[in-house]
Image (cartoon, helix red, strand yellow):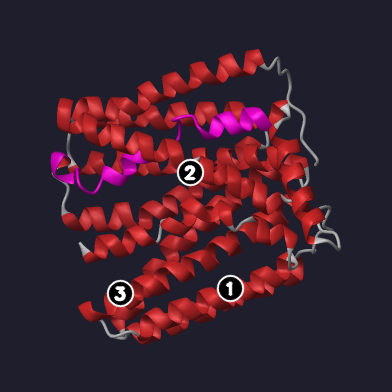
Amino acid sequence: AEIALLLGSTLIPNIIKFIWAPLVDTTLSLKQWYVITTILTAAGIFASAMLPVQESSLALLNTITVLTNIAVSFTYMVSTGLAAHDTPHELRGKVGGYSQAGNIGGLGLGGGLGLWLAIEFKSVILSGIVLSVICLATCFALFFVKEPVSTVKTGKAAETIGNLFKDIWDTIKTRFGLLALILCFMPLGTGAISGFFADLHSFWNASDSTVEIFIGVIGGLITSAGCLVGGWICDRMERQKAYIIFGWINALTCVGMVFSPHTEILYIIWTSIYAFTLGFCFAAFSAFVFEAIGKGAAGTKYTVFSALSNAPIYMVTILEGWTQTKYGLNWMFSIELLCALLATVLFFITFKALRIGKLAPVEV
């Protein structure tokens, strides 16, 4: 129960990060924010590693975890802000893919490396030191990107804040921005069922070691690879439609998994395919959001869309859990296909209602 609370606390900053997102685009430069929050993140990793591994440390560890994840949320806002300003329209699919691959792959590789160091050398402190140094080393990437000229900041705080909210509203009220906003709420490509794969492994007679390997680090790396491929595809077709197609492919994987023979090898194959196609969905999401936000207060705008996209993830997760309890495994896995059908209908109704032909990129 204590560990569950600790894990849950890592999600809190990501849910409410839109509250402090405006600070990134209205105060310091993006590069300054990156350096400051990366130092704070490294300090949080190091501080957590210095705590004694015992139950009495959990309260302090929980506090450190929340504060560190707040710093991480700033770092991600800055990264997306820099990417939005420095990326031409024709490459935003790839950048969306790289952004998601770094997010997911970094989590898997960092967590895997930290765990390996702690076990191999029997030292949590060494693990914390190595990960902190790697975290700080990412600041060297700032030498290869330009600091964008802000179109929001002025000499007056009130005027700057006014410009920020005007920029957000100017983006959302466009047909392109409104469509992206609606896509964020659609129950498509949520990856919700992947959260149940570990708990459901016994239905496929999969061993605990198989779950640890293929649902853990390797699953994250497979999803990262899917992000890169999905981003590449998104630069070769309309990104909103790519999101719908990828969502369908991902949902059909669930149907194939539940209605095929329940063996360990098929558990490995289907969960890997699901992870790979989920990367497609993540890349397409970032790609169409990068298109919608344009420039301006890009970090804040991306954060708003990202925070809103959490709503369907939680709703589908709850729905799938309830369905499995009430109607069984087959219906639980079929939920993602039904959600894909609903999302597709809503998308094309919206698309037609807004009378959007070929969507043009937004430069705010």
Closer to us: mark 2 or mark 3?
3
Identified at 66% across, 46% down, the residue is 301
Q: Which residue is at a point 23% across and 66% down the rendered structure image?
A: 2
Three-letter code, disc 1:
Thr
Determine the image quadrant of residue 9: bottom left
Point out residue 343 in the picture as x, y percentages from the top left corner.
Answer: 47, 23
* Separation of marks 2 and 1 at Cα, in angstroms: 26 Å
Q: Position of residue 213 (x, y in %)?
A: 29, 57
**Placement of the N terminus among the 4 image quadrants:** bottom left
Find residue 25 and report its horizontal and vertical position in percent: 72, 58
Front one among 44 and 13: 13
Q: Secondary structure at mark 1?
A: helix
Residue of label 3: 59
Q: What label sits on residue 10 in the rendered view?
A: none
Tag shown at residue 279: 2
Are discs 1 and 3 less than 8 Å apart at CB? Answer: no
For disc 1, the marked residue is: 38
Instruction: State the count of labels.
Output: 3
Q: Left of 111 or right of it: where is 37?
A: right
Given the image, on which type of amino acid does mark 2 rest? Gly
Q: Which residues are magenta?
A: 177-203
Q: Which amino acid does the dot numbered 3 rest on?
A: Ala
